[in-house]
């Protein structure tokens, strides 16, 4: 017997730079998801190792210097410098993240993610915790988005379609 998928939007498993915080109850009245297009996105990926050890070391030094310059330029502006690359499962209605902190059902989280689109976009999402599952020394936390608007939902849908296109393209190449 085939079970019908009752989800309104498709989901995608991925890794994205992410930062989450508990929203205090006094801040929950006017939550509104938003897209930040003027942020500075700092990639956390180090350059690949090359056979030439001296060249590899110089590339790493240059990468560190560029990170420092970007950090200086981004002071006073939004950036993703404190965000860490985390596994997540996301749709236009909610997401599941893995985190060290434990939350309670009904808590509201502010989740900041960076979408690797051109140009990069930093999304501020708000989600009510609907499920918590222990996962080794961490927790899988599922949230249902609140304070969502069409602009942010459309950015999530564009990202979802992009990821699904990548999967289909990779499958065709096999």
Image (cartoon, helix red, strand yellow):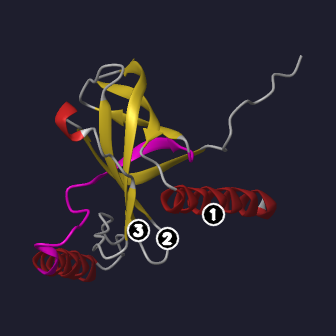
Q: Earlier in the sequence, mark 3 or mark 1?
A: 3
User: What is the magenta range?
Assistant: 73-92
Q: Gap between marks 3 and 1, in whole Å? A: 14 Å
Q: Nearer the viewer, residue 29 or 92?
A: 29
Q: Is residue 39 left or right of residue 94?
A: left
Which of discs 2 and 3 lies nearer the camera? The answer is 3
| CB-based contact (under 8 Å), mark 2 and mark 3 | yes
Position of the C terminus by quadrant: bottom right
Question: What residue appears at the point 51 percent right and 49 percent down from the top-left corner?
Answer: 14
Which element type, helix, strand or loop, lies under badge 1? helix
Q: Which residue is mark 3?
A: 121
Q: Is residue 43 magenta?
A: no
List x then y, in percent, for residue 87. 43, 43
Residue 69 appears left or right of 154: left
- Mark 2 element type: loop
> Residue under circle 2?
117
Judging by the rendered image, the residue that carries numbered circle 1 is 162
Check contact, mark 1 vs mark 2: CB within 8 A: yes
Q: Quadrant of residue 156?
A: bottom right
User: Is the residue under label 1 in contact with that under label 3 (CB below 8 Å)?
Assistant: no
Q: Earlier in the sequence, mark 1 or mark 2?
A: 2
The CA distance from mark 1 to mark 2 is 9 Å
């Amino acid at each position: 017997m085939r079970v019908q998928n009752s989800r309104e939007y498709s989901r995608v498993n991925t890794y994205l730079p992410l930062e989450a915080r508990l929203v205090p109850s006094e801040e929950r009245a006017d939550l509104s998801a938003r897209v930040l297009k003027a942020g500075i996105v700092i990639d956390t990926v180090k350059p690949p190792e090359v056979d030439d050890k001296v060249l590899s070391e110089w590339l790493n030094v240059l990468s560190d210097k560029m990170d420092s310059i970007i950090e200086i330029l981004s002071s006073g502006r939004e950036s993703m410098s404190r965000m860490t690359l985390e596994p997540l499962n996301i749709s236009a209605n909610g997401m599941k993240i893995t985190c060290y902190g434990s939350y309670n059902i009904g808590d509201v989280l502010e989740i900041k993610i960076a979408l690797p689109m051109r140009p990069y976009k930093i999304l501020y999402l708000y989600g009510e915790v609907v499920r918590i599952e222990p996962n080794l020394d961490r927790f899988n936390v599922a949230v249902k988005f609140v304070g969502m608007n069409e602009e942010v939902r459309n950015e999530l849908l564009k990202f979802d379609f992009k990821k699904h296109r990548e999967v289909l393209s990779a499958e065709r190449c096999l």
